[in-house]
Amino acid sequence: MKMKVRVEKVFQVELLVSALLSLVNLGIEFTWFRVGISIIAFLSILINFKKFIFYHIWNVVVINVLFSFTFESFLKLIAHFLPDYHWELFILDLLLLPIILLPLIFVSFTKMKNMWWRFITLVWLNPWIRSGYMVNNNEVSMLIYYLFFAGLYTGIVWYLFKEWRYYFGFHFKVKNLNLTYWLGAFLLLATTITIVIFEVSIHQANYWNEIFNLNLDYIDLSMPMASYSSYIKDTFSAFGGVLIEEVVRYLSLFTFLIFFKNNKHKLLFSIIASMIIFSLAHYSWIFDSEVRYRIIVIVLNTIDFGCYMALIYLYTGKLWLVWLIHMAFDWLVSSGTPLAQGMLLSDNSNGYIYLMIKWLVALIILIIFLKVPAFSSRLNDTANRMVKRR
């Protein structure tokens, strides 16, 4: 109880500091946006000190946005007066991120009782805690920050699952290993690998009769970029991105499994819902008319991959295995040289035919694993362990 009171006091101090910083930012540059931030800062103080009935919901929706803006603006202000201390400020930003964020997590996130609020708030938290101070957009600092953020976000989700009395299924031990299990695992992994290779080869093709002609000369695993440092950057950036995406997939699967727990089709509905949410995470620039078709294709193109990742996790109970496969896929797809871009899929109609083929294969695999009792029982076992209370 004493620890809880101390954390709440720290959070209240952060609110006061944030309000003060919002006034400093407003004094430096008057904009209506900054006026709004200042109003939100002082409203947050009132709502938390008076403990209005909705203050936990207010905190999880508003406070991370408020903290993100006020503290980042403060760091940029310091950087303006101390231009030679970029790395010191970057380290300060890394230290401030958990210091500022964790009291909010302890005070309000742990109090979320409704499963939908839990899912929404954790997904909502994602973009706001990664908007930190960058050292002139330096590749190394961006890489460090992104990896740090990915690890912090994963740790927060693990902690909240523990507080909510659920298991975070990083590694569920498989029961009753037998030949049927290994047959299913082989079918899933072989199909996924084949689809990944097909993804690369069809993008190289100029005509339909070339879609299975994988030219390894057009792939350079040591570079999308040319230098050793870029090689490391691409590897770790893929790792950081996959961490976040697969944690969000786990959250969506978990949420919908609870929602459909009394429905006989809970696996089907949960997998489809997680596929859609995963694909929509790639919506960036969807309203930019110049790249709209490309982004729509990216969104649609990820649906089948989301199906395979959900099935692999539910079948094996290994989140780390899904991470590795997803990271390898992202790395391979980004390793194509300029010569790897064929003309076949530049035609919109060909692109949609290609998507239909991928979706059909994914649908067949999904039906097999849901209808074959030896396979579906494995999926159900992992699903039940995911939603089991501690």
Image (spheres, rainbow, N blue to C red):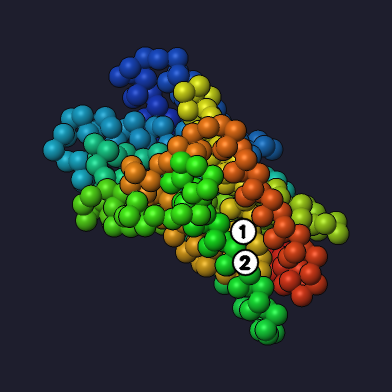
Q: Which residue type does callout 2 highlight?
A: Leu
- Mark 2 surroundings within 10 Å by alpha-carbon count, few (fewer than 14), some (14 through 19), many (20 or more): many
Vertical arrangement, residue 131 with respect to residue 325, above or below = above
Q: Secondary structure at mark 1?
A: helix
Q: Earlier in the sequence, mark 2 or mark 1?
A: 2
Position in image of residue 387 (x %, y %): 71, 63
Vertical arrangement, residue 125 with respect to residue 41, above or below = below
Q: Kindly identify which residue carries mark 2.
A: 188
Q: Quadrant of residue 258?
A: bottom right
Q: Which residue type does callout 1 highlight?
A: Tyr
The answer to which of 224 and 340 lies nearer the viewer is 340
Vertical arrangement, residue 182 with respect to residue 297, above or below = below
Marks 2/1 in contact by CB < 8 Å: the verdict is: yes
The answer to which of 207 and 276 lies nearer the viewer is 207
The answer to which of 193 and 95 lies nearer the viewer is 193
The structure residue drawn at horizontal position 24% and vertical position 33%, both measured from the top left corner, is 78
Gap in Å between the C-alphas at discs 2 and 1?
7 Å
Residue 308: mark in rendering: 1
Position in image of residue 317 (x %, y %): 62, 70
Q: Secondary structure at mark 2?
A: helix
Query: Quadrant of the image for the N terminus?
Result: bottom right
Q: Is residue 97 visible?
A: no
